[in-house]
Image: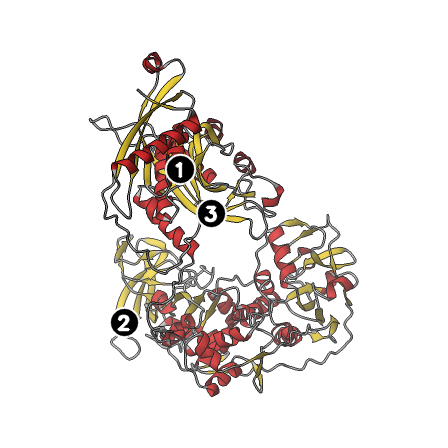
Amino acid sequence: MKFTLSWLKDHLDTEAPLEAILYALTDLGMEVEGVEDPAAKLGAFRIARVLEAVPHPNADRLRLCRVETWPDGPGGRAEVVQVVCGAPNARTGLVGVFAPVGTHVPGTGVDLKPGVIRGVESNGMLCSERELMLSDDHDGIIDLPADAPLGARFIDYRGLNDPMIHIKITPNRPDALGVRGIARDLAARGLGSLKPLDIPAITGAFPCPISITIAPALKTKGCPIFAGRLIRGVTNGPSPAWLQTRLRAIGLRPISALVDITNFFTFALNRPLHVFDAAKVQGGLRIHPAAGGEELLALDGKTYALRPGMMLISDDNGPESLAGIMGGTASGCTEATTDVFLESAYWDPITIATTGRALRINSDARYRFERGIDPAFTLPGLDLATQMVLDLCGGEASDLAVDGAVPDTTRAYRLDPARVVSLVGMDIAEATQRATLAALGFTLNGDMATPPTWRPDVLGEADLVEEIARIASLSKLEGKPLPRRQAGVPQPVLTPLQTREKSARRTLAALGYNECVTYSFIDSTAAALFGGGTDAVRVDNPISSEMTHLRPDLLPGLLRAAARNQARGFADMALCEIGPVFGGGEPGEQALHATGLLVGASAPRDPHGSRRPVDLFDAKADAEAVLAAIGAPARVQVTRKVPGWWHPGRSGVIGLGPNVLATFGEVHPRVLAAMDVKGPAVAFTLLIANVPLPKVKTPTRPALKLADLQAVERDFAFVVDAQTEALTLVNAAQGADKALIDTVRVFDQFTGDKAEAQMGAGKKSVGLTVRLQPVEKTLTEAEIEAVCARIVEKVAKATGAVLRG
């Protein structure tokens, strides 16, 4: 939103300096993005007089001028400089605009320097309007009246010393898209008073010959009210200088008086209007939904094909305007226009936004209507604009033609002065709160506050508090410590799942993984590789074809990241991610996973030969480390029933019975090929929520338990079938005495031809180390032998193993 300081002062009676206004705007939530101060650009140009203008001795089209200047301003010392000028109107006695040496001329982009033109010195420049970027006039230098104050700054004389302010408006503040809305906020802050807005009473001189009809289906929502009147006998020439200057200051090109008036009201009062050339309108105007297939040549020179349901303004010839967005050229006003139909309406924000987005039209009208303008200002805005047309273009106005009614947006919310303290933490007197809301246009009735019609964003008691705090200035909010609710250690703030997520993230980082944050949306092909891609997780309005489904697993995103890194020459990677995955589209069908991916080699190249390809045991070790960090039990089971995206012979599942805690192993080669990843690649996935909570919940860590008694270790070598898994032996040995046996580890495996030669065909040897940890007393040799016997018995029963001789 752009406006000038003088434009603001048309609505705000203030003596506040520009710096105070700029600070207040940002503090009120309308962030100042920039200020264009004409004094910085045109302040060096001063009014001067040509004492003498004679022909250049070496050029027929140039004149040699002696210019009297006042570099220190009126009343200061006079200085005569020599200037070579090529303007045809340069003459003795001319009062014009002079730029001294060192001045930057914005129209040419040149910094003036002393020069020699055709053998004659020239110091400075007599300027045209185009060189000052005031207009496109370059036929001659600026010719001022003889009584113009010599030595004065040209911007002060012409009234151009008017800073242009550019502010950022958030979507919830449509009222600030008009200069008056901005002035209202500044007045409520105390930087002046809001000037009254006098609405003229327009008396029609004749009935309006153009009828208005709103389709019944649109009256309830699309277009509740549409009004207009005919003004005949107008003269549509250039708009006045003050209006053109104001529009140019905010970056708009003046077109004609009628069009400039509608642009003026769009920015001054946030009231978009439209003018039709009445001579080009056949019959009445209808507001109706498009049937689909209609075409409209709009004022931007483009032809738009309309879809069913888009709102149109049509006459008997067909579409004339795209409602609330842009008019058509068929009924556009020109300099030949003598009769004009001036229209003011209220359009539904959702309908306007939908149409504008579908047709990709950006206009000032759409920008305001889709955010919600003041519906109650529809008719007053029309009267104000009618009066300006009559004042600037002449003519005679008809009676008002209107269909529909202003929609009722009345609503009230309770004003509780104590809520400002509880919600914001600012202690503001009740009288000040009520005065603030009244200054913003709220109607107060007891403890109920009714928002004004121009504030569609106020929808509850909290919004009342926000307005009060915003006007009071949130910069005055003082930091205070939170009160203690009770003595002693406070209750933990994080939930168990949040605590585990934090621990998993820290552990993965400590293990050397780089955390990734990937999209929760993936393409259907990748989702299908990991058991997803069903309609239950399909996105109705995807951002792109690569984000059509919610992800069923974190691995697709990590594999995509690995493929991109490999394409850039990075072969060895350790990537991880913690985030949600989705089994369906309903509440409760979301789970928190932690996934790690290892690609390439385990270490960089070195002279010690420590580099090797990563394998499933790397993934298993890291998975167990993270499980231990988040509190998983030490004794778990490992099985082979893995999903299809894991290598069937080189992967496993860590669980407690049917409860799956993690899956680890090599990623299936088929998946790697589909994701364009060069292996080897191993990974693990932890289901954080599946880890059982401790039976005793405390906000602190459990007490450290240290064994006072000496542990005992015994080694066993079992001969078993070559196809028997070592894990089966470990689990059997572990179950021999759950109280005494602390750990069981595989320390040796003897397989191959030599093993079969010693132990028989199809046999192998597996060595186990069993650690016994007594708790109550030191174990006797007999007790140790008894436990060892039970271990042998359990392993033999589970696998048919015998002790190796």
Spot occupied by residue 530 in the image (x, y as percentages of width and height): 52, 36
Mark number, residue 735: 1
The answer to which of 676 and 173 lies nearer the viewer is 676
In the foreground, 305 or 799 = 799
Q: Given the image, on which type of amino acid does mark 2 rest?
A: Pro
Nearer to me, 513 or 133: 513
Provide residue 94's location: percent of width, then percent of height: 38, 70
Q: 731 or 132: which is nearer to us?
A: 731
Real-space Cα separation, disc 2 to disc 1, in angstroms: 102 Å
Label 1: few (<14), some (14–19) or many (≥20) C-alpha neighbours in 10 Å:
some
**What's the residue type where badge 3 is placed?**
Asn
Dot 3 lies on which element? helix
Colour convention: secondary structure
Residue beneath label 2, please? 71
**Residue 126 shows in this picture:** yes
The answer to whether residue 438 is left or right of residue 623 is right
Q: Could you tell me which quadrant the C terminus lies in?
A: top left
Instruction: Write down the quadrant of residue 638 in the picture.
Output: top left
Q: What is the secondary structure assignment of the residue under circle 1?
A: loop
Q: Which mark is residue 539?
A: none
Q: What amino acid is found at the position of numbered circle 1 in the picture? A: Gly
Rendered residue at 31%/42% (across/down): 511
Circle 2 residues within 10 Å: few <14, some 14–19, many ≥20? many
Foreground: disc 3 or disc 1: 1
The residues bearing labels 3 and 1 have C-alpha atoms spaced at a distance of 24 Å
Q: Residue 24 at what x, y percent from top left? A: 40, 74
Q: Percent x, y for residue 716?
A: 31, 28
Whether residue 325 appears in this view of the structure is no
